[in-house]
Amino acid sequence: MLERAAELQLLERPGGRRPVTATEAGERLLRHAARATAAMRAAEADLHALAEGDAGTLRVATFQSVGVRVIPPVMRLYAARWPAIEVRLVEAEYGPLIELLMRGELDLAFVADPLETAIERIDVLTDPYVLLAPAGSELAQTGKSVSVREIAQLPLIAYRGTQGGEAHLRRKGFDPRVVFRSDDSGIVQGLVGAGVGYALVPRLTVDRSDPEVAMLDVRGVPPREIGLAWHTDRRLSPAATAFVEVVEEVAAGLRASEHDPSTGGGRR
């Protein structure tokens, strides 16, 4: 019926035991159907939030470094102002996180990557990359900023994903020598402190109270631009709007602390 309506073949039917596959026209139709389904789910979630008014549940997705540095002060301030709202936090990888946002299963999500066209965002923090070095290493003693070429020659402790700083090194034509991978920022920093290697990481992930690790500025690696995002087809509820405002308030304080030496901002 769909093929008759479209006047195009949507499926390849080779016969026998060979699998049926979508034609190019079929693939395009599937993409349109997925977007339409996501829009309907977003609309359903929007109506549900509207019916609940100012009370109910706010679903917010985050990732590890934001969860450690940004979420705690945000939650303290938000809970004091909106005690009737239950904030349900979800920690997720970027891909599934965006899918949940598109389907209307999340109200807001912290993001650090380019976004789908159907997503709106506010900028929260610019998070530069830094190099973690063992405190006793020759590189740490110099206290100088480090170039991409210098970093590519070091043994690196890296995250399991190949995005971020490591991806930038590869785009520059370097093949980083990764000696260990972990998704846990504490493990990455601990191994650097133990002298196993160095780590190119976003500054937000760094525990600056660690005496075994030095943090060096990096030249040539663009920072992460962390934002707070939502589906463009959804009208933010008063509770979600208030959460956005609290995030902006907390982020302004964090940005100020980065430029205040008395708070530990800047290079150690």
Image (cartoon, rainbow, N blue to C red):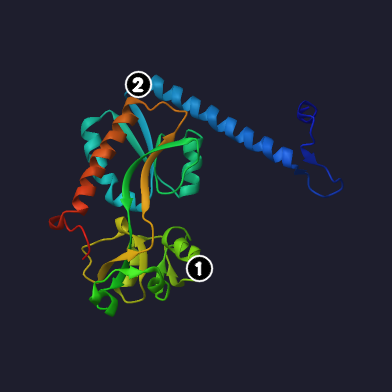
- Binning the other alpha carbons within 10 Å of mark 1 as few (below 14), some (14 to 19) or many (20 upward) gives few
Q: Residue furthest top?
A: 51
Q: Nearer the viewer, mark 2 or mark 1?
A: 1
Q: Position of residue 48 (x, y in %)?
A: 44, 23
Q: Residue at x 76, y 37 (%)?
A: 10
* Front position in the image: 250 or 47: 250
Q: Amino acid at mark 2?
A: Gly
**Quadrant position of the C terminus in the picture:** bottom left
- The image quadrant that residue 61 belongs to is top left
- Please determine whether, in this image, residue 81 is positioned above or below residue 109: above
Q: Is residue 215 left or right of residue 196?
A: left
Q: Which residue is mark 2?
A: 53
* Front position in the image: 168 or 178: 168
Decide which of tag 2 and tag 1 comes sooner along the chain. 2
Q: Amino acid at mark 1?
A: Gly
Question: Whole-Å distance between the Cαs marked 2 and 1?
Answer: 53 Å
Tag 2–tag 1 contact (CB < 8 Å): no
Q: Residue at x 48, y 39 (%)?
A: 100
Q: Decide if residue 106 is in sight here.
A: no
* Front position in the image: 258 or 246: 258
Q: Which residue is mark 1?
A: 173
